[in-house]
Amino acid sequence: RHEAVAAVAAATPAVATASAVAPAPAVATVPAVAVVVTPPVDAVSPRKSLLQQALAPDLIAAWEAEQSFTPEQEAAMAAFRQRLAQADKLADWADNKPTFYRFCQARGYDVDKAVHMFTEHLEYRKKWGLDEIVDGPHGPASKFLYEYKFAERSAVKKAYNYSHHQTDKQGRLVYIDRAGSLDMDALTKAADHEGLLKSYVWDCEATMQFRLPACSLAAGKYVGKTLTIIDLEGFKITKFNSSARSYLKEIAGLSQDNYPELLGKMFVVNAPWVFKTVWSVVSPLLDKRTQQKISIHGKDYRKHLAELIDPARLPDFLGGEDTSCDFVHEKGPWADKTPDINPPPDINPSPADEKRL
């Protein structure tokens, strides 16, 4: 959900400051350079992770056909890989073309800047322990994803409605964020800052290691982008106090630095006039690629969403036919393949819990 908070932060006066292992062997040819990507020997499990399956040569080939990389971009990605290998920084999970693309694209194919960004990302992964891999019920993945549990998840979701729900017509992961109804006071009472941040990192990694790979397998091609819908129904600028601004700024920075180039398209719907007015000032400051990804709508958004999302997969509160989006249970090709961040039910409920039951 990082693209969502970054966009809302950028266009709001009070908030202006405010998906891993290698693929099977593949060769990408660039002028005078051949990049050979070879998977490591899996010391954790003979099973392939969901991401490893999504990085199969035929799925990558289908993805590359859509990208139409220029010779200059191919050369930059090859040089990026070579620099990482020479510096012994080419982690096994990153030795694949979609990763080269994400970091190079994020830095305008400036190899020096892309290498620096990736080096910083390795430190981030080390800090959170994201590269300790275990073989769990859903295949090899970060130990963090299997072991971390967020007991406050339900209360957080009530204060802040967001969910990964279904896929669009291109097979992209759909993320729905009802930022307009965000109750920041209830959110901060539901969980402390550390818990919110840790659960956010968990969501980002779950997207990289499970959600997007499952979308890829369902689509028959590698899928590395999302379609984000930000619903501003009920939006009030007073909701975004200093606490909200600080939190949004922190997670937006974390996301932009560590999970670049995931946004394929964003719709901001039910946008009040003040948001659209500020956006008209802010948008020219963004690069053209970002501007083209974001569409701002008032109440006239339904036909636009229907062009990209099948009505049967679009929630009814957004004009679709799907009544299953409850912001608690995710629905999509990843739903039964992703670890659960919620702790298991208490088999020995307290007297207070028993009374409620």
Image: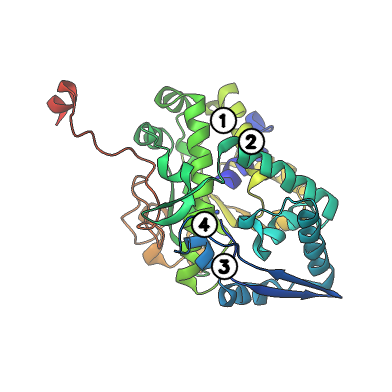
Q: Are marks 3 and 1 in contact (CB under 8 Å)?
A: no
Foreground tag (3 vs 1): 3
The type of residue carrying mark 1 is Ile
Residue 347 located left or right of residue 232 = left
Q: Nearer the viewer, mark 4 or mark 3?
A: 4
Residue type (three-letter) at the residue carrying disc 3: Leu
Question: Which type of secondary structure does the marked residue at label 1 adopt?
Answer: helix
Q: Determine which residue is flagged by label 1.
A: 237
Residue 337 placement: quadrant = bottom left
Q: Is residue 195 visible?
A: yes
Please tell me which of labels 3 and 1 falls first in the chain.
3
**Foreground pick, 112 / 329:** 112
CA gap, disc 4 and disc 3? 19 Å
For disc 4, the marked residue is 43
N-terminal-most mark, 4 or 2: 2
Q: Amino acid at mark 2?
A: Thr
**Structural distance between the alpha carbons of marks 2 and 3:** 38 Å
Q: CA distance from mark 3 to mark 1?
A: 43 Å
